[in-house]
């Protein structure tokens, strides 16, 4: 019944229904359903191995690359089930649903080429000037433009960890996505870089729908609007972040957010 | 008070063991170095003569009907009133092919390559000259008319029955053709196979896994098959079945290509595997298709490793003689091959041929050709190391 009220909600961007995922014999995601709202930051929390990353990767079908992964159920994005058929244009799906990973993973190329890679793939720019514009805009949105504008053609590996992660965000933004999936984007970064990324996420949620996995409960508290608590492949509780942290209804959620385990 | 003893050295058995192992390793390294030095020094010492050539200056004062006669006549005039035997000796001071290279139409001083016996005498290897020849040669050396000079013929000529003018150009060209074809044949196939095995979706089910394992074992096995077996394959399939020409670099190229194919596959797979999964994720996450990810990200990142592996494979193929002998590239080739269908030979086979020749003059050619081949291989291996150092990506 909770599901029904959410489905009717006009601000719903992603609707996950009865999602089940198996890795071989291991049932990693058990009958998950949840709704993710537009222009919200949704945080997925839970202990290691509880399936939050698997859930996140299911949202843009990155699990397709895992050999023995089987997915059942439906994920509706703007009312279209991305698992409807195996012939869904997953490349366009992943263009609209961008992903940033735990460890900064720039390509071994120049900063410019890193950002321009996506637009080039999808032929989004007619001319060099247009491409330059996309690169500049994306880097500006990721608050990186000022730091790198004089060394756009230097290798991206020369950037610091925090800068690399912002470059990865800029790279995702360059293909003009609607949803950003962040898989523990700050876990490899120092507190100052983490703060920079958090500010960036708060700003980006104005134009994008953001789903992030985090191990850091303080971070979830600071920047997310909705929080989902995962435990052993099941969604134990979903609700506004305030509610999850202040008045969790479920016993497991309560002991997790209060730091009893995890 | 000092709690941790930092000053005393290792003692007793531990120390002896450590020192012993250290000396053993140093010794092994020294022996390797000594072997290499002795090897190169021997080759250099024995082959150095081949890099110089003895030439003889002859004054032509009078023209005869043919160039051959003109040269012979000029030789006879070195001794007053020669008899038949002396004439024969004198004729044999210049290389028997001298007249075929030059057309003498006016009088003057001409330079010819000296006969191998003169060459060997001047180089001090042996003395097979008769009395007349020796007198004339000593005389000409006094006058600076017989002298040693840089042997261009060694680099620009092909094989010959006369060691003094035999060269490696024909064999080198054959090697270049053969290896070029081998690369053209093996590189795309090898890299393609490796990409398929590493990058393309692993289909579900046991049959697919079994098939992949079977292919993997086979490829690893092929890398260890004796090279002569590939020669037999080339002979049976390419020449007998497909009717390709014998002794041609085309057949040699394909045969050597098959020989280095497993090495390229293995090297490429290793290189592809060193590209971290995060790069694939990043590219796929941006909506790149599998082909785009492979072509734009994975392959460029793996290329240094692939090329290094390929160069090492090529270095092996360059040194191969057995398969080429099987397919008939062991012929006596006087003219460098003009295209891949022409009969050709290759450097290692040329070395084998010269080593087999009874003429003493070929001994130094053999060493020199080995030396050239080795230098080529060293350069290739250095190139491989340089490429790896220069383009390797530190993830």
Image (cartoon, coloured by chain):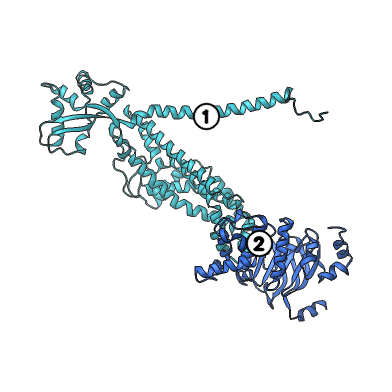
Residue B382 lies, in percent from the top left, at 49, 41
Q: Residue at x 27, y 25 (%)?
A: B117
Q: Position of residue A165 (x, y in %)?
A: 66, 59
Q: Quadrant of residue A20?
A: bottom right
Picture coordinates of residue B19 (x, y %)? 66, 25
Residue A234 in view here = no
> Mark on residue A166?
2
Vertical comparison of A113 with B160: above or below: below
Q: Colour of chain B?
A: cyan
Question: Residue visible at 28% across and 26% down?
Answer: B119
| Residue, disc 1 | B33
For the image shown, how many numbered marks are present on the structure?
2
Q: CA distance from mark 2 to mark 1?
A: 52 Å
Of the pair B314 and A255, the residue shown nearer to us:
A255
Question: Which shade is chain A?
Answer: blue
Q: Where residue A34 sits: x, y (%)?
A: 77, 72
Query: Can residue B35 be seen in this snapshot?
Result: yes
The one nearer the camera, B248 or B78, is B78
Q: Is residue A77 above or below residue B197?
A: below
Residue B151: name its quadrant. Answer: top left
Q: Which chain letter matches label 2? A: A
Q: Residues within 10 Å of mark 2 (few under 14, many from 20)?
A: many
Instruction: Determine whether the residue tagged by mark 2 lies in a helix, strand or loop.
Output: helix
Considering every residue shown, the one lying at the far top of the view is: B131
């Amino acid at each position: 019944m909770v599901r029904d009220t959410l489905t009717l909600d006009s601000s719903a961007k992603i609707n996950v229904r009865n999602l089940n995922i198996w890795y071989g014999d291991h049932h990693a995601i058990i009958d998950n359903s949840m709704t993710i709202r537009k222009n919200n930051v949704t945080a997925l929390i839970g202990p290691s191995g509880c399936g939050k990353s698997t859930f996140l990767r299911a949202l843009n079908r990155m699990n397709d690359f895992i050999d023995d992964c089987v997915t059942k159920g439906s994920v509706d994005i703007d009312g279209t089930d991305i698992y409807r058929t195996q012939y869904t244009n997953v490349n366009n799906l992943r263009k609209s649903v961008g992903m940033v990973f735990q460890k900064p993973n720039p390509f071994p190329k120049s900063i410019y080429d890193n950002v321009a890679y996506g637009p080039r793939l999808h032929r989004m720019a007619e001319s060099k000037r247009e491409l330059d514009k996309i690169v500049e805009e994306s880097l500006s949105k990721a608050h990186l433009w000022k730091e790198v504008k004089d060394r756009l053609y230097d290798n991206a590996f020369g950037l610091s960890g925090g800068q690399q992660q912002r470059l990865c965000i800029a790279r995702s933004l360059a293909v003009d996505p609607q949803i950003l999936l962040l898989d523990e984007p700050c876990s490899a970064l120092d507190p100052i870089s983490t703060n920079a990324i958090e500010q960036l996420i708060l700003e980006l949620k104005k134009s994008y729908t953001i789903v992030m996995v985090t191990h850091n409960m303080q971070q979830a508290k600071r920047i997310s609007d909705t929080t989902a608590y995962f435990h052993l492949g099941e969604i134990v509780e979903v609700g506004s972040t305030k509610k999850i942290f202040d008045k969790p209804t479920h016993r497991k959620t309560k002991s997790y957010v209060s730091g009893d385990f995890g | 008070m000092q709690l941790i003893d930092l000053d005393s050295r290792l003692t007793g058995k531990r120390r002896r063991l450590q020192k012993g192992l250290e000396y053993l390793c140093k010794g092994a390294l020294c022996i390797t170095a000594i072997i290499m030095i002795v090897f190169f020094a021997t080759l250099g010492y024995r082959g150095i003569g081949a890099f110089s050539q003895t030439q003889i200056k002859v004054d032509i004062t009078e023209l005869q009907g043919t160039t051959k006669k003109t040269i012979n006549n000029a030789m006879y005039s070195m001794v007053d009133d020669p008899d038949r035997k002396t004439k024969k000796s004198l004729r044999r001071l210049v290389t028997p092919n001298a007249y075929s290279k030059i057309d003498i139409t006016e009088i003057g001083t001409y330079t010819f390559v000296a006969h191998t016996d003169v060459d060997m005498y001047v180089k001090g290897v042996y003395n097979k000259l008769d009395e007349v020849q020796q007198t004339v040669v000593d005389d000409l050396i006094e006058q600076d008319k017989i002298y040693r000079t840089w042997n261009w013929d060694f680099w620009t000529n092909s094989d010959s029955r006369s060691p003094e003018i035999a060269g490696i150009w024909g064999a080198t060209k054959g090697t270049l053709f053969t290896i070029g074809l081998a690369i053209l044949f093996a590189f795309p196939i090898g890299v393609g196979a490796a990409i398929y095995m590493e990058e393309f979706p692993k289909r579900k089910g046991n049959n697919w896994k079994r098939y992949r394992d079977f292919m993997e074992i086979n490829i690893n096995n092929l890398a260890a098959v004796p090279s002569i077996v590939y020669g037999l394959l080339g002979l049976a399939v390419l020449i007998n079945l497909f009717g390709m020409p014998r002794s041609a670099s085309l057949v040699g190229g394909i045969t050597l290509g098959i020989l280095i194919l497993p090495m390229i596959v293995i090297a490429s797979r290793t290189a592809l595997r060193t590209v971290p999964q995060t790069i694939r994720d990043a590219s796929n996450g941006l909506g790149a298709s599998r082909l785009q990810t492979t072509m734009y990200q994975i392959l460029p990142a793996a290329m240094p490793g692939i090329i290094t592996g390929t160069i090492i494979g090529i270095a092996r193929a360059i040194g191969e003689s057995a398969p080429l002998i099987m397919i008939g590239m062991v012929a006596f080739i006087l003219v460098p091959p003009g295209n891949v269908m022409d009969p050709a030979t290759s450097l290692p086979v040329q070395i084998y041929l010269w080593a087999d020749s009874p003429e003493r003059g070929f001994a130094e050619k053999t060493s020199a050709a080995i030396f050239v081949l080795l230098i080529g291989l060293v350069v290739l291996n250095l190139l491989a190391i340089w490429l790896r150092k220069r383009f390797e990506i530190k993830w």
